[in-house]
Image (cartoon, rainbow, N blue to C red):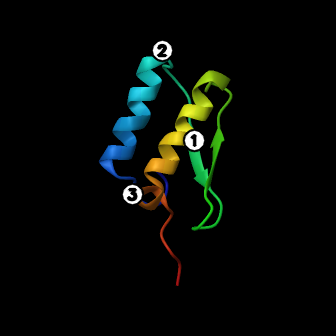
Amino acid sequence: MRRGRPSAAWVADCADVARDLDVAAGRVDVLGPRLQPWLRFSPDVPERCRQRLRNVLGVHRASVLPPQRG
C-alpha cells in the first residue's frame, strides 16, 4: 500500500483469488476517481485472474477507495 488502507476483507478476498488460481506474484493498483475506481495489473497477474479481482473490487468498492484530499 502506498496510500489509503484497504479493508482486511478486501485483502483476504484478493489473496483467496490468487491462491485459487495459483498466482504467486503480481501487483494490483486501484486508480481513478473515488466514484469510479479501476484496477491496473502488473504483467505477473494472468488474464484469468484479472476479472475475478475486478469482481472483488465491486464487492468491496467502498473499502478500497483512495482517501479524499483536501
- Pick the front one: 41 or 10: 10
Report the Cα–Cα distance between label 2 and label 3. Answer: 25 Å
Q: Determine the residue positioned at 43% across, 51% down.
A: 60
C-alpha separation, residue under disc 1 versus residue under disc 3: 18 Å
Please tell me which residue lies in front, 28 or 16: 16
Please, is residue 53 above or below residue 70 in the view? above
Which residue is most to the bottom? Answer: 70
Label 2: few (<14), some or many (≥20) within 10 Å? few
The residue carrying mark 2 is 22
In percent of width and height, residue 43 lies at 68, 28
Q: Residue at the location (32% across, 45% down)?
A: 9
Of the numbered discs 1 and 3, the one sitting upstream in the chain is 3
Camera-nearest label, 2 or 3: 2
- Relative to 29, say whether 50 is above or below: above
For mark 1, give the secondary structure: helix
Identify the residue at image location x=53%, y=41%. 55
Residue under numbered circle 3: 5
- In the image, what residue type sits under mark 1? Arg
Dot 1 corresponds to which residue?
54
Task: Tell me where residue 2 appears, x and y as whole percent.
Answer: 49, 54
Q: Circle 3 — which element?
A: loop
In the picture, residue 48 is in which quadrant? top right
Of the residues shown, which amino acid type is indicated by label 2? Asp
